[in-house]
């Protein structure tokens, strides 16, 4: 585009936009950009520029569609693992495994849900900040940049229902993350129990501990309208 800013990528390749962790009504979910042919942008610099240009919380580049080799970027960072890109890519590519820099991620489709298996230590650091009620979480204002805060409270502790909001704090234009798989995994590991998380405006994330230190993370995925 002639009026594009100077830091726009030289090329914007074909890409899918998904909504990951949609609510029970099919709405909401966190937007994800997926470049199925990652070879179109082989360098980290070009990928970072596209992720910044698209402005989603994450953009994923598929380097090998048969093996599910992925490369994940926020608008400012390359990530070794992230939950919503893996769930979205697993749904789009329909693979049993994905390969990210952190390790091999198991994947499966089960009815309306797409699930991955990953280790919580793969997740980037997040500050898990507990509040006394869902209403307190709802009332929070966006905190100043500086740390990635996952604010949460039980809606129904016995049932494992959680209200959460995610504030990346990176100063990259993403003030609040609609649905955050990595933080959901960290909270699940911290509490050591299965969770049903309502995050953002109405996204839903499901988690459950698995054998050998893995955790399962699932949600609904659709093409973003």
Image: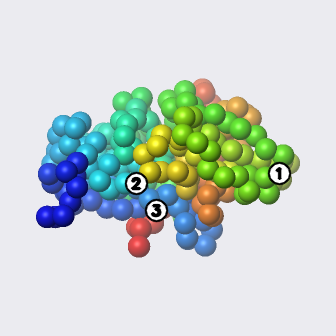
Q: Would residue 122 be found to the left or right of residue 200 on screen?
A: left
Mark before the other along the chain sequence, 2 or 3: 3
Mark 1–mark 3 contact, CB under 8 Å? no
Q: Give the residue displayed 76% in from the left and 40% down from the top.
A: 130
Q: Residues within 10 Å of mark 1 (few under 14, many from 20)?
A: some
Q: Residues within 10 Å of mark 3 (few under 14, many from 20)?
A: many
Specify the quadrant of the image occupied by residue 182: top right
Residue 178 visible to an observer of this rendering: yes
Place of residue 160 in the rendered image (x, y in percent of width and height, measured from the top left) = 77, 48
Q: Would residue 95 be found to the left or right of residue 9 on screen?
A: right
Mark before the other along the chain sequence, 1 or 2: 2
Q: On screen, 225 above or below 64?
A: below
Place of residue 197 in the rendered image (x, y in percent of width and height, measured from the top left) = 68, 52
Label 1 sits on residue: 133
Q: Circle 1 sits in a helix, a strand or a loop, which is it? A: loop
Label 3 sits on residue: 19
How much space separates mark 1 and mark 3, taking CA atoms? 27 Å
How much space separates mark 2 and mark 3, taking CA atoms? 11 Å
Label 2 sits on residue: 56
């Amino acid at each position: 585009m002639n009026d594009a800013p100077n830091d726009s990528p030289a090329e914007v390749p074909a890409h899918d936009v998904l909504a990951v962790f949609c609510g029970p009504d099919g709405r909401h979910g966190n937007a994800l950009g997926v470049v199925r042919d990652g070879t179109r942008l082989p360098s980290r610099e070009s990928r970072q520029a596209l992720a910044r240009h698209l402005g989603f919380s994450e953009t994923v580049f598929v380097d090998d569609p048969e093996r599910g080799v992925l490369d994940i970027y926020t608008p400012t960072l390359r990530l070794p693992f992230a939950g919503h890109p893996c769930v979205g890519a697993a749904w789009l590519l329909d693979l049993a495994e994905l390969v990210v820099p952190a390790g091999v991620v198991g994947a499966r489709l089960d009815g309306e849900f797409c699930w991955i298996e990953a280790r919580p230590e793969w997740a980037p650091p997040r500050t898990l900040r507990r509040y006394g009620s869902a209403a307190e979480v709802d009332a929070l204002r966006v905190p100043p940049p500086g740390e990635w805060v996952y604010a949460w409270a039980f809606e129904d502790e016995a049932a494992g229902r959680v209200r959460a909001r995610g504030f990346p704090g990176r100063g990259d234009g993403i003030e609040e993350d609609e649905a955050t798989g990595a933080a959901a995994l960290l909270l699940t590991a911290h509490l050591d129990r299965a969770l049903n998380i309502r995050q953002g405006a109405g996204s839903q994330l499901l988690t459950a501990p698995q054998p050998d230190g893995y955790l399962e993370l699932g949600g609904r995925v659709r093409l973003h309208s």
